[in-house]
Amino acid sequence: MKEEKFISECETVLKFIQLHCNDKHKVVNKKEDKINLIYKNKNLDINLKYNLCEDCASTFKYSYERLQNCPYEDKPRCRRCPKPCYERNEWKILAKIMKYSGMKLGLTKIKKLFRIKK
C-alpha cells in the first residue's frame, strides 16, 4: 500500500479506538502517548497522539503492527481480505470497536444535517 493510504488507515483506526475508549472506558488513569509512524522501514515524520486506557492502547498498537505488515499493494478492507492477518480474538475486539464508532460517527453526521442554523 502507498504511504498516504497507510497514514490514512492508521489515523482512521486510532480515531475509532479513541472514540470507543472515551465513551466506554471512563478510566482516570488513561495514558497519553504518541506513536511515530514508520512504514517499510521509513520514518514518515508523523506523530499520532492518543489518550487511551491500557487495553485500547494495546489494540491500537496491534492494529498498527498489522497495517505495517500488510502484504497487499492495493489494500483491501480487512473484513474482505482473502488472507486475514488478525488473530480471531483481536479481530472480534476491533470489529466491536469499529461497529460502535462507525455508528456513532454516522449518527453525528446525520444530526449535523438536520440542525437549524441560527
Image (cartoon, helix red, strand yellow):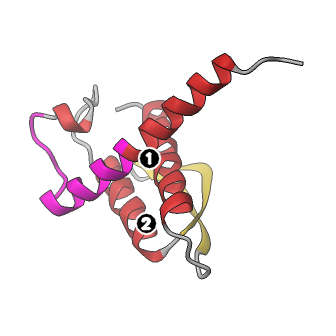
Residue 112 in picture, x, y percent from top left:
67, 24
Report the residue at 62% width, 55% height from top.
47
Residue 113 in picture, x, y percent from top left:
65, 17
Report the residue at 28% width, 25% height from top.
74
Residue ranking furthest to the left: 82
Name the quadrant of the N terminus.
top left
Relative side of 59 to 23, left or right = left
Front position in the image: 118 or 7: 118
Examine the rendered structure and indicate whether residue 103 appears above or below residue 86: above
Residue 22 in picture, x, y percent from top left:
56, 60
For the residue marked with disc 2, what is the amino acid?
Answer: Cys
Residue annotated with mark 2: 56
Please tell me how crowded label 2 is: few (under 14), some (14-19), or many (20+) other residues with Cα within 10 Å: many
Relative side of 94 to 106, left or right = left
Please tell me how crowded label 1 is: few (under 14), some (14-19), or many (20+) other residues with Cα within 10 Å: some
Front position in the image: 110 or 82: 110
Residue at disc 2, secondary structure? helix
Q: Is residue 27 visible?
A: yes
Residue 53 in picture, x, y percent from top left:
50, 73
Examine the rendered structure and indicate whether residue 77 appears above or below residue 50: above
Residue at disc 1, secondary structure? helix
Question: Which quarter of the picture shows residue 59?
Answer: bottom left
Q: Which residues are magenta?
A: 82-99
Examine the rendered structure and indicate whether residue 117 appears above or below residue 70: above
Report the residue at 56% width, 71% height from top.
26
Residue annotated with mark 1: 13
Relative side of 10 to 31, left or right = left
For the residue marked with disc 1, what is the amino acid?
Answer: Val
Question: Which quarter of the picture shows residue 115?
Answer: top right
Which numbered disc flags the more N-terminal residue, 1 or 2? 1
Distance between the Cα atoms at labels 1 and 2?
Answer: 11 Å
Q: Is residue 9 visible?
A: no
